[in-house]
Amino acid sequence: MRIISGQHKGSRLLAPKNLPVRPTTDRAKEALFNILQHEFDFENIRVLDLFAGTGSISYEFASRGVPQILAVDQNRHCIQFIETTKKKLNLTIETFCSSVEKFLERFSNPQTIVFMDPPYSYTEESYSILIDHLLVNCLEDQGWIIAEHDTHHKFDSHPNFIQKRKYGSCQFSIFKKK
């Protein structure tokens, strides 16, 4: 895994092999961040990274100057890896070791971007429930929710869906308040 751009461009990070994760590919990250850099001023946004895993997405945002990043994952080994990496690179990432559902029960601070990458076993219904909750409780008016998912999930009919991007077996569906 490497950081694609920004202050820490090219930094290679070796996550422990025993982490139960499926990191976003470099190709997919690069394509996604090319879109985001034209839509948002990274120095003036807040990011919530749900199901953070290795923290790959959080590192990309931090490397590009995002001042507030919250990373949530229920696996304590993932959170420990993010904590170690953020200290090593001096990144502004706040971590929470919690299930996403429990974290969101007590969280209501609107974010500019919410990135979510649940396990691929997550059902379409579970995605929709989570997206609807985030739209109402956790997203700024002009913010985006970005859901990473496999090719089996389709969200085109969701009323807040704005676009889908596909990179190999990885897809990003983007949602916005209407």
Image: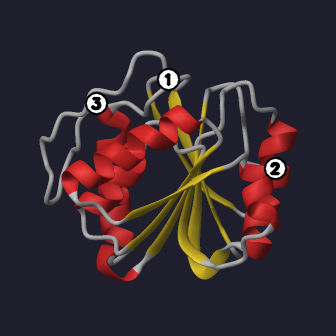
Along the line of sight, the residue nearer the viewer: 154 or 111: 111
Q: Identify the residue at horizontal 68%, vertical 49% (top origin).
A: 98
Q: Nearer the viewer, mark 2 or mark 3?
A: 3
Q: Is residue 109 above or below residue 29?
A: below
**Which residue lies under the disc numbered 2?**
128
Type of amino acid under label 1: Leu
**Residue 1, label in figure:** 3
> Residue 137, image x and y in percent?
76, 74
Residue 43 picture quarter: bottom left
Q: Earlier in the sequence, mark 1 or mark 3?
A: 3
> Residue 70, image x and y in percent?
51, 63
The quadrant in which the C terminus is found is: bottom right
Cα separation, mark 1 vs mark 3, equals 13 Å
Type of amino acid under label 3: Met
**Residue 19, label in figure:** 1
Q: Earlier in the sequence, mark 2 or mark 3?
A: 3
Q: Is residue 47 above or below residue 121?
A: below
